[in-house]
Image: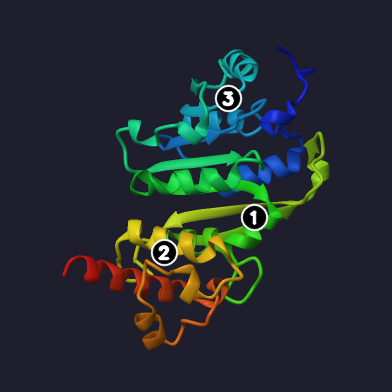
Amino acid sequence: MNRLHRPRKRFGQHFLQDRGTIDRIIAAIHAQPGQHIIEIGPGKGALTIPLLECVGEMHAVELDRDLAGYLAIRCQAYGTLHIHSADVLKFDFSQFPVADLRIVGNLPYNISTPLLFHLLDYKDHIRDMLFMLQREVVERICSVPGNRSYGRLTVMLQYHYEIEPLFSIGPEVFAPAPRVDSAVIRLKPWSEPRYQKTDTMILSRIVKAAFAQRRKTLRNALRGIIPETQLDALGIASSRAETLPVEAYVSLADFCSSDKNQ
């Protein structure tokens, strides 16, 4: 394969090609020798090569077998690249025997949300993540209660991560150019928990149910999960999911957890 490789729509391929944008992302990652870096969707290696030059050895997950073969050859002169030709939505990040993975990438927009949820399963293995995403997704992640963009993704990521939006990127830096703007964001597990610790499986269940039908009140959305009397006691039975802050969902999860253990 050569540089004339045609982007494949089914893989959501938009190749980063602007030198200034590449340099800006690499500076934000600030990779150091010895760090354990995994790149998702390396494409033609725009980020891979400068990262290899920094760390000497890294891993990449690439579904497109043609690109994987191309990268293996192209990156030989820059360091040791371990390529995993796999679907990242099924990829087991716990296979790496370290607890300080740095995960980076220009994520395919068609899988970014399910991938962010998938990565929650490996939070204890991750030091930080830096991703280029559709700007709309970044806005959802950073949203606040009361906004239309506030949702399940917002609550779960804000509970687990310290979130830092870095900068926006126009479509012209890609080939082919997407029809949307992009943004770069850093997610880092809280070093000091911002929210009280709770049963994250119960939290996830409550948040998923609350936002499954956004127009429903919590009295209806959480029926069978949390007694209406408890919602009334908290004064939120008639509220809708997008109005509750993260800490309110944590309180609901704590109630369910303590009720389950009685």
Q: Residue at coordinates 54% horizontally, 64% vertically from top-left?
A: 211
Closer-to-camera residue (216/87): 216
Element carrying mark 3:
loop
239 vs 251, left or right, is right
Tell me the residue that label 2 is attached to: 206
Within the image, what quadrant is residue 260 found in?
bottom left
Q: Name the mark on residue 137.
A: 1
Disc 3: CA contacts within 10 A as few (<14), some (14-19) or many (>=20):
some
144 vs 220, left or right, is right
- Position of residue 16 relative to residue 228, above or below, is above
Which of labels 2 and 1 is toward the front?
A: 2
- Position of residue 75 relative to residue 19, above or below, is above
Answer with mark 1 or mark 3, whichever residue precedes in sequence.
3
Check disc 1 and give the amino acid type.
Answer: Val
Q: Residue at coordinates 45% horizontally, 55% vertically from top-left?
A: 188
Closer-to-camera residue (85/23): 85
Element carrying mark 2:
helix
Q: Residue at coordinates 35% horizontally, 81% vertically from top-left?
A: 230
Which of labels 2 and 3 is toward the front?
A: 2
- Report the Cα–Cα distance between label 2 and label 1: 22 Å
